Image: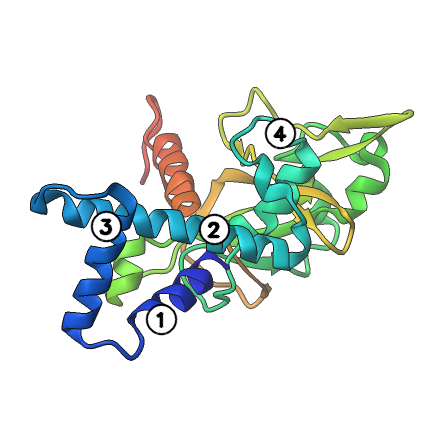
Amino acid sequence: MTTNSISDLAGSIAGQKSHDDLSKTINSLSEAYAGKSKPKNTPQNALMAFNEIFRGTVSHQIMLNGFGNLYKKIGTGTLDDSEKAKLNSFLIFTPDISIGPGSIFKIKGLGKNKKKFISAILDQDEATLGTAYGKIIPIAIEVTPLCNAAQGNAQHTYFLNGLIHPKSYPNGTGTKEIKIRGRSPHCYTFEKAFWDNDNNEPYTLSFNLKLFHSALSDKYVSIDKKIRDNLVIDLQHQISGYISRPGHVLL
């Protein structure tokens, strides 16, 4: 969404302009933002002007996607968990569904092993989670180094297995947050949630750092979603820290 917004805006500014006309436009934007300034500060001021324009354009796109005026609460500290999840459903996931770092795949065919798979990551069992348990989806996410994927020179494709699951589960008259196994160094979860339109509730992703591998199984089915590069890098750091921990030798 953000990429599309910036592309549309940049196209409207740069389209039908010669190099000289485009330079004049950028200089005008710089002056409009900061007034008269030293020539050496023109590029910085122009970038700041573009930043202000992009902010408004992205806010407009958020409103078009059914978020109303939630964008006005960004940075104010007044967003609740559900509102943050609704925003993150567009701010975390991108429309690029091609294979590559960040691509998410549903793992099919686990059968009886699904319960064992889930119990290795989450701290609550089926009896505790109730209806939330049936909404949990075992996944694999590609964590191939970004530079190798971009340059097309990666000899292996790397994956990490985990879960997409509701952020909370019903608990009496309210809800309680689903937790990963806190004492297990192999468990890791994203703090931020995203909004699941099918179930109308916040979801998040949790992982088993032991399940880092380089095999694209025929049991992996793309769910046409992809996380941003900074989250891929976060996972890569978590994996690196786990496999390099004291007392552990990677063979």
Foreground residue, 86 or 123? 86
Q: Which of marks 3 and 1 is in front?
A: 3
Q: Which amino acid does label 4 sit on?
A: Ile
- Marks 2 and 4 sit apart, C-alpha to C-alpha, by 38 Å
Q: Nearer the viewer, residue 139 or 42?
A: 42
Please tell me whether mark 3 or mark 2 is closer to you in this view. 3
Question: In this figure, which residue is indicated by the disc labeled 3?
Answer: 30
Q: What distance separates the C-alpha of mark 3 from that of mark 4? A: 49 Å
Q: Name the residue under label 2.
A: 56
> Is residue 34 visible to the viewer in this orientation of the structure?
yes
**Residue 65 against residue 31 in the figure, above or below:** below
Q: Do the residues labelled 3 and 4 touch (CB within 8 Å)?
A: no
Toward which corner of the image does residue 182 lie, by quadrant? Answer: top right
The residue identified by callout 1 is 11
In x, y percent, where is residue 245?
A: 35, 26
Q: Can you tell which mark lies on residue 180? A: 4
Q: Is 43 situated left or right of 156 in this image? A: left
Q: Which amino acid does label 3 sit on?
A: Ser
In the rendered image, residue 174, in percent from the top left (x then y), is placed at: 85, 26
Residue at the spot 27% in from the left edge and 54% down from the top edge: 29
Could you say which quadrant of the image residue 215 lies in? bottom left
Residue shown at 73% from the left, 43% from the top: 115
